[in-house]
Image (tube, rainbow, N blue to C red):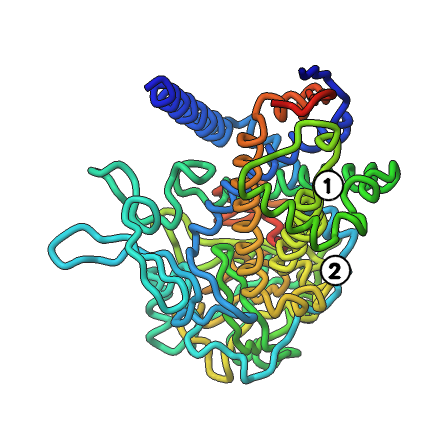
């Protein structure tokens, strides 16, 4: 016999900053790919060694035919026609790093992409500061996100990894709190990846570099900062994909409601199913 | 069967939503009002940088070992203006840089006279708005002492650089900077690159070096400096060829 009840799950500041963050990160990613497309190659160090990118997306001309999209990662070449390097409608393909459906605007326009990017970078920063100030002031970052000693016990970590892999999620009182994998993931995203995005972004600014040589040196030079910016963005995309999969696997409507109205349904009696 | 059906339905919904999303973003990108909202961030960026970064701060300088072996020439690399080509063919022997506008003493300086002005050498990083960077050594006349010689009038606020090249075959390239940047010690009219006379591909006989800003501010083939109180009447009115086409006038980011 099970009874269920709606319990308060996410506070209003969390819900607002979450959705503003979703909007900002999405627009930053897509306008960022537009900016990347202006020179779809990445390097290490202060300058571009054009002969030695660690990542390059190109259109390779083919004798007597259409070019093919080639993505070079380290020493390996991958054929990525249709998505990376050479994409668009089959009869009107063009040389483009990331395809038009992934960029803002959908056509090649660096100036407009930069407008979008810098506007929503400010949105992300103000949103992040609001979340951080509130999280620290209310103590919720410490209470809800910092793992406890029990969280970090090897047996608990093993248990969480195994149950996540089996897509088994608690539906009872335990669902009121984040599990240790959530805590660690959210901490890494909010307090490491997103701040790194901002810092590496600033390190690419020649104006900021003049006032803070240490910042660009910290990342190993401007081209390294650009590479780290891209890698952190990729890790955020990876996080979003896993996050969405977990949302779906652990009850999409219940999760979605808790992030909109704040209320989450838990089972309070019996063993569940 | 029903789950397959549902999957198709969900995929359709996802595709339509992302299509709508893209269409909405594209629509904002082409609307004046949408772009005006996005532009408000540029003011914020400029103010924040001016607040946080000392405008006299020097751009990083690098050791000679980091100089790029093949610096990428960008923009125009061989202007087809007949007068320019004649000067280039003659090694710029009779070429003169015009300094006019809101100055007490308009003048025309030969390359030899420019070389006699207070000079500076610096090994700096050139950051293209596209995202790549190259490093080179630049030697040139410091702009500040040159402007002092011409004597700026009190209403002069910007220096406009008029160039010999044209990217679209219709209008000539131009750029502008304010007086704080003009008097920055690293702001040069460079006549040498890597200890050799500036090659044509890089802007001979002189190009602007305004370190701390993106590459498109570094006007090549500079023919004339004009001191102005505002640049709203020049070409598109945004203070530069690329700013007229949507790029930031203040290119510190």
Residue in the image at 60% along x and 68% along y = A221
Q: Is residue B16 above or below residue B198?
A: above
Residue that sits furthest to the left in the current view? A64
Q: How many neighbours does mark 1 have within 10 angstroms: few (below 14), some (14-19), or many (20 or more)?
A: many
Identify the secondary structure beneath mark 2: loop
Q: Is residue B88 left or right of residue B49?
A: left
Q: Is residue A78 left or right of residue A241?
A: left
Pick the residue in front: B111 or B174.
Answer: B174
Point out the frontmost of discs 1 and 2: 1
Q: Is residue A31 left or right of residue A95?
A: right
What chain does mark 2 sit on? Answer: B
Residue marked by disc 2: B55
Decide if residue A115 is in sight here.
no
Residue marked by disc 1: A128
What chain does mark 1 sit on? Answer: A
> Percent from the top left, x then y, of residue A1?
67, 15
Give the quadrant of residue B23: top left
Pick the residue in front: B175 or B62.
Answer: B62
> Percent from the top left, x then y, of residue B62?
61, 78
Identify the secondary structure beneath mark 1: helix
> Percent from the top left, x then y, of residue B172?
43, 52
Pick the residue in front: B201 or A273.
Answer: A273
Q: Quadrant of the C terminus of chain A?
A: top right
Q: How many neighbours does mark 2 have within 10 angstroms: few (below 14), some (14-19), or many (20 or more)?
A: some
Q: Is residue B192 above or below residue B236?
A: below
Q: Which mark is residue B25?
A: none
Q: Are marks 1 and 2 on the same chain?
A: no
Marks 1 and 2 sit apart, C-alpha to C-alpha, by 28 Å
Q: Is residue B84 above or below residue B92?
A: above
Residue in the image at 58% along x and 35% along y = A168
Q: Is residue A228 left or right of residue B43?
A: left
> Percent from the top left, x then y, of residue A125?
71, 42
């Amino acid at each position: 016999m099970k009874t269920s009840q709606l319990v308060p799950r996410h506070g209003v500041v969390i819900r607002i900053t979450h959705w503003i963050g979703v909007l900002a990160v999405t627009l930053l990613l897509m306008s960022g790919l537009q900016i990347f497309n202006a020179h779809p190659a990445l390097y290490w160090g202060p300058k571009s060694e054009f002969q030695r990118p660690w990542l390059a997306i190109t259109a390779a001309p083919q004798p007597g035919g259409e070019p093919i999209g080639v993505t070079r990662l380290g020493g390996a070449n991958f054929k990525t026609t249709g998505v990376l390097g050479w994409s668009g409608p089959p009869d009107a393909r063009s040389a483009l790093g990331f395809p038009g459906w992934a960029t803002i605007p959908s056509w090649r326009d660096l100036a407009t992409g930069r407008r979008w990017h810098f506007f929503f970078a400010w949105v992300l920063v103000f949103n992040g500061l609001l979340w951080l100030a509130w999280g620290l002031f209310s103590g919720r970052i410490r209470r809800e996100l910092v793992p406890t000693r029990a969280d970090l016990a090897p047996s608990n970590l093993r248990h969480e990894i195994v149950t996540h892999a089996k897509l088994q999620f608690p539906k009872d009182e335990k669902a009121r709190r984040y599990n240790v994998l959530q805590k660690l993931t959210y901490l890494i995203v909010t307090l490491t990846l997103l701040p790194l995005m901002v810092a590496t972004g600033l390190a690419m600014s020649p104006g900021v570099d003049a006032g803070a040589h240490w910042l660009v040196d910290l990342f190993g030079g401007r081209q390294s900062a650009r590479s780290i910016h891209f890698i952190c963005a990729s890790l955020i995309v990876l996080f979003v994909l896993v996050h969405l999969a977990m949302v779906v696997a652990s009850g999409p409507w219940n999760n979605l409601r808790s992030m909109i109205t704040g209320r989450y349904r838990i089972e309070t009696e019996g063993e569940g199913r | 069967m029903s789950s397959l059906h549902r999957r198709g339905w969900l995929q359709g919904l996802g595709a339509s939503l992302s299509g709508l999303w893209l269409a909405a973003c594209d629509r904002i990108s082409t609307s004046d009002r949408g772009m005006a909202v996005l532009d408000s961030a540029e003011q914020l960026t400029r103010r924040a940088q001016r607040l946080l970064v000392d405008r006299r701060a020097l751009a990083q300088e690098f050791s000679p070992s980091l100089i790029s072996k093949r610096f990428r020439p960008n923009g125009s690399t061989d202007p087809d203006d007949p007068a320019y080509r004649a000067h280039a063919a003659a090694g710029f022997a009779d070429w003169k840089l015009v300094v006019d506008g809101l100055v007490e003493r308009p003048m025309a300086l030969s390359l030899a006279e420019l070389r006699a002005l207070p000079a500076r050498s610096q090994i700096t990083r050139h950051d293209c708005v596209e995202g790549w960077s190259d490093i080179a050594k630049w030697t040139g006349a410091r702009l500040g002492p040159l402007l002092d010689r011409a004597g700026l009038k009190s209403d002069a606020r910007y220096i406009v650089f008029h160039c010999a090249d044209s990217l679209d075959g219709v209008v000539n390239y131009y750029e502008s900077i304010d007086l704080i940047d003009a008097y920055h010690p690293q702001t040069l009219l460079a006549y040498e690159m890597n200890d050799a006379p500036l090659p044509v591909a890089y802007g001979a006989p002189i190009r602007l070096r305004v370190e701390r800003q993106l590459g498109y501010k570094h006007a090549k083939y500079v023919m004339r400096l004009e001191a102005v109180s505002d640049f709203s009447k020049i070409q598109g009115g945004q203070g530069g060829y690329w700013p007229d086409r949507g790029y930031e006038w203040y290119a510190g980011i």
